[in-house]
Amino acid sequence: MQRVSSAAVHIDGAEVAAIGKGLLALIAVERGDGEAQAARLAERVVAYRIFADAQGKMNLSLKDVGGELLAVPQFTLAADTASGLRPSFSSAAAPATGEALFAKFTEKAAQVVHVATGRFGADMKVSLVNDGPVTFWLQSRS
């Protein structure tokens, strides 16, 4: 996830989602992930303290600052790149599972903050203004 001043998703030249201040979360689902992991990740994303407080310290969460979340499904994050010169996607969840758990993630996050989304399986153009830059990789299980 990246702290952003703004971010947007375009598909076939048309803007399908956009946010102002908030987080851009690129979401991958791996084999073995389930609804519990999707819900836990959503809870962590909206509550993770990466926004500055009055003293300039990362002490405030997305929900604390009233920020927005742009969630983008990105199965390539589940790639195994440990060897060779081509990524392996054997650890990625099946598309139907990935799409269902991405929907669970966004549904849970939308209970707390405004959520905009990319489109599962689409060829998306994602633009952002990274604020910081501040980027973190969160996992819902070890």
Image (cartoon, rainbow, N blue to C red):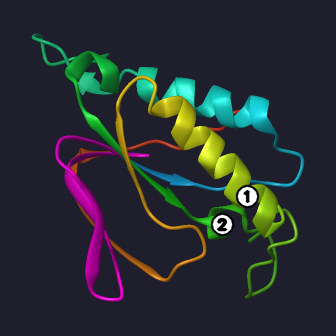
Q: Is residue 61 visible?
A: no
User: Is 52 or 113 nearer to us in this picture?
Assistant: 113
Disc 1 marks a residue whose amino acid type is Gly
User: What SS does tag 2 mark?
Assistant: helix
Instruction: Residue lying at the far top in this picture: please name it.
Output: 55
**Relative to 96, is 71 above or below?**
above
User: Is 66 or 44 nearer to us in this picture?
Assistant: 66
Disc 2 marks a residue whose amino acid type is Phe
What's the magenta bit mostly, secondary-structure-wise?
strand
Residue 18 lies in magenta, yes or no?
Answer: yes
Disc 1 to disc 2, how far (Cα)? 8 Å
User: To which quarter of the image does residue 22 belong?
Assistant: top left
In the image: residue 41, left or right of residue 87: left
Q: Residue at x 12, y 11 (%)?
A: 55
Residue 136 position within the rendered picture, expressed as x and y whole percent measured from the top left: 46, 42
In the image: residue 109, left or right of residue 22: right
User: Is 39 or 16 nearer to us in this picture?
Assistant: 16
Q: Is residue 27 visible?
A: yes
Whichever of callouts 1 and 2 sits on the residue coming sooner in the sequence is: 2
Residue 27 lies in magenta, yes or no?
Answer: no
Q: Which residues are magenta?
A: 1-23
Q: Residue at x 58, y 67 (%)?
A: 120
